[in-house]
């Protein structure tokens, strides 16, 4: 499979799996060819990309450690929690605790993350999908600190509800168009509002409430709402800050272009070097993420273009790339093993592409299907 942008080029492509909204409702079934009517429908709901079948990828697909039914259940629980908060009731329900336990159980079963979890959601689902993803990434990063199980679960609750203060600004967030500086200043208050909401709840660990308060603070003092720096920012908030930045820049939103996993990881590294994000925790996260997950279209050092069959995992395994074309002229089907350090130009991935280059669109369809993960040529 590969993920393509939702524009005219997507018409005729077949969905690789059911496209569901954040509450598990099927919008379009797997195998459905995209028509201009479906395209308009999905664009209208704020989707910007979809997963489509790609015979060249040999069935390569990103692996999400959170299975879809679990994700749907967690999303519904966050939805309940938000509704309760809006009515002034206790937001941290037993269901929210169970949801964090579900995420922890899924992560235990999965040895590594090889995909930025989301990317496929409508604009109105963004809040829920983002909350679940930030919780997952935070619990991955939390592996870098020796937390006991109770603290790990409390951190998970803080991460899952880090943006609960947004309930007061959802209309503003869901409004199409660019946010004005005044809008952004109002939205920035979601940190204080979230803190107030969570700290009033007796059973919530105060450190989890501080996650809502401090997740936009930066180590160099350039964050908000208070501009605190260094050790004044809690370790839990530092974790959630990294998860939040990563998920925000890899998410499809109408007001910012989506970045590839590799670009997002580079940005995290730059923020760590600039002493904005915690360097130790960023390094820990980088060591656990694939830069080029399965299904990504990539360009190699020698100009060849291919689709990643198997994502690279730092320190564990190289990526395998099915080469589709060399510079759009000479077709060169074959599979390459890519070492993480890319010692030869032909064996290094230099960039992720949003899709096959347009000049190749016809040519790649004529290639035989990928045969699997055999290495060679
Ligand atoms: Fe936030």
Image (cartoon, rainbow, N blue to C red):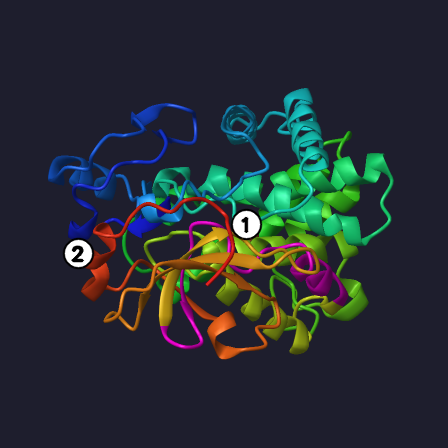
Name the one closer to the observer, 185 or 145.
145
Name the one closer to the observer, 93 or 149.
149
Does label 1 point to a residue whose CB lies under 8 Å from ligand 1?
yes
Rendering coords of residue 178 (x, y %):
31, 60
Identify which residue is drawn at 51% across, 64% down: 262
Does 299 appear in magenta? yes
- Secondary structure state at the residue bearing disc 2: helix
- Establish if 375 lies above or below 106: below
Can I make out residue 205 in this image? Answer: no
Of the numbered discs 1 and 2, the one sitting upstream in the chain is: 1
Q: In which quarter of the image is residue 154?
A: top right
The numbered mark at residue 362 is 2
Quick check: 262 left or right of 151? Answer: left
Q: Quadrant of the N terminus?
A: top left
Rendering coords of residue 132 (x, y %):
56, 38
The numbered mark at residue 190 is 1
Question: For the view shown, which residue lies furthest in the front direction?
Answer: 377
Assess whether mark 2 and mark 1 are in contact (beta carbons under 8 angstroms): no
- Establish if 21 lies above or below 340: above
Does 349 appear in magenta? no
Rendering coords of residue 236 (x, y %):
75, 51
Using a 10 Å C-alpha cutoff, classify the residue at mark 1 as few (fewer than 14 neighbours), some (14 to 19) or many (20 or more): many
Identify which residue is drawn at 48% across, 50% down: 294
- The span picked out in magenta is 280-303
């Amino acid at each position: 499979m590969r993920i393509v942008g939702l524009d005219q080029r997507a018409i005729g492509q077949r969905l690789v799996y059911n496209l569901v909204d954040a509450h598990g409702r099927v919008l379009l079934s797997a195998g459905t060819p995209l028509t201009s009517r479906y395209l308009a429908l999905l664009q209208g709901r704020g989707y910007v990309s979809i997963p489509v079948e790609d015979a060249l990828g040999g069935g390569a697909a990103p692996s999400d450690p959170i299975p879809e039914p679990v994700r749907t259940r967690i999303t519904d629980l966050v939805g309940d929690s938000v509704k309760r908060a809006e009515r002034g009731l206790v937001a941290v329900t037993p269901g929210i605790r169970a949801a964090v336990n579900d995420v922890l159980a899924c992560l235990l079963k999965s040895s590594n993350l090889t995909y930025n979890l989301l990317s496929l959601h409508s604009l109105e689902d963004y809040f829920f999908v983002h909350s679940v993803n930030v919780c997952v990434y935070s619990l991955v990063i939390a592996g870098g600190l020796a937390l006991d199980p109770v603290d790990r679960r409390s951190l998970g609750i803080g991460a899952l509800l880090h943006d609960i203060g947004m309930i007061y600004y959802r209309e503003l967030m869901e409004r199409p168009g660019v946010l004005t500086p005044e809008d952004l200043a109002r939205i920035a208050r979601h940190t204080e509002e979230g803190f107030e909401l969570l700290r009033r709840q007796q059973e919530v660990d105060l450190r989890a409430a501080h996650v809502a308060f401090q997740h936009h603070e930066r180590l160099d003092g350039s964050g908000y709402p208070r501009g605190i720096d260094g050790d004044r920012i809690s370790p839990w908030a530092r974790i959630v800050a990294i998860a939040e930045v990563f998920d925000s820049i890899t998410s499809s939103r109408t007001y910012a272009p989506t970045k590839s996993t590799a670009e997002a990881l580079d940005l995290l590294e730059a923020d760590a070097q600039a002493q904005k994000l915690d360097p130790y925790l960023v390094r820990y996260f980088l060591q656990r993420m694939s830069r080029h997950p399965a299904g990504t279209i990539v360009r190699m050092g020698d100009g060849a273009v291919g689709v990643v069959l198997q994502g690279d995992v730092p320190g564990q395994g190289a990526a395998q790339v099915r080469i589709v074309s060399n510079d759009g002229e000479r077709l060169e089907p074959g599979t390459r093993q890519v070492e993480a350090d890319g010692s030869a130009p032909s064996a290094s991935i230099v960039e992720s592409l949003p899709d096959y280059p347009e000049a190749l669109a016809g040519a790649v369809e004529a290639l035989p299907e990928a045969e699997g993960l055999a290495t060679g040529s």
